[in-house]
Image (tube, rainbow, N blue to C red):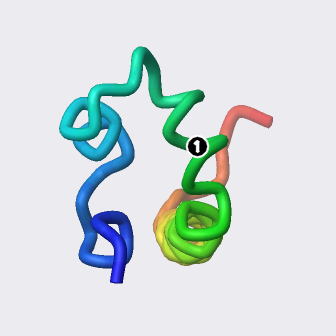
Amino acid sequence: MSLSDRGIPLEEVSRLVGHSSTAVTEKVYRRQVRPAIQTEAVVMDRVFEAGASDVEPNSSS
């Protein structure tokens, strides 16, 4: 199990392993990082969908 699998942010993994940037970390750990990014994207979609239902239509339109 990788650090990203354990919920460690990519920025932290990059710093811990001494990469010069998160781009290097993404390239090296692409297979481990991609599922985490996809999971986070699904969660964000749910957040925005839930938030959209809470927004009242603009009455001035």
Question: Up-down: is 36 above or below 21?
Answer: below
Local secondary structure at mark 1: helix
Q: Position of residue 52 (x, y in %)?
A: 58, 64
Instruction: Residue type at mark 1: give it.
Output: Glu
Q: Is residue 37 left or right of residue 16?
A: right
Q: Is residue 4 left or right of residue 7?
A: right
Q: Nearer the viewer, residue 41 or 45?
A: 41
Q: Nearer the viewer, residue 51 or 39?
A: 39
Q: Is residue 28 left or right of residue 3?
A: right
* Circle 1 residue: 26
Q: Please identify the quarter of the rendering in which residue 7 is found.
A: bottom left
Which residue is at a point 56% across and 55% down the rendered structure image?
Answer: 29
Question: Up-down: is 17 above or below 56?
Answer: above
Q: Please identify the quarter of the rendering in which residue 31 is found.
A: bottom right
Q: Is residue 37 left or right of residue 18?
A: right
> Looking at this rendering, what residue extends furthest in the bottom direction?
1
> Looking at this rendering, what residue extends furthest in the top direction?
20
Question: Up-down: is 52 above or below 16?
Answer: below
Which residue is at a point 41% across and 15% down the rendered structure image?
Answer: 20
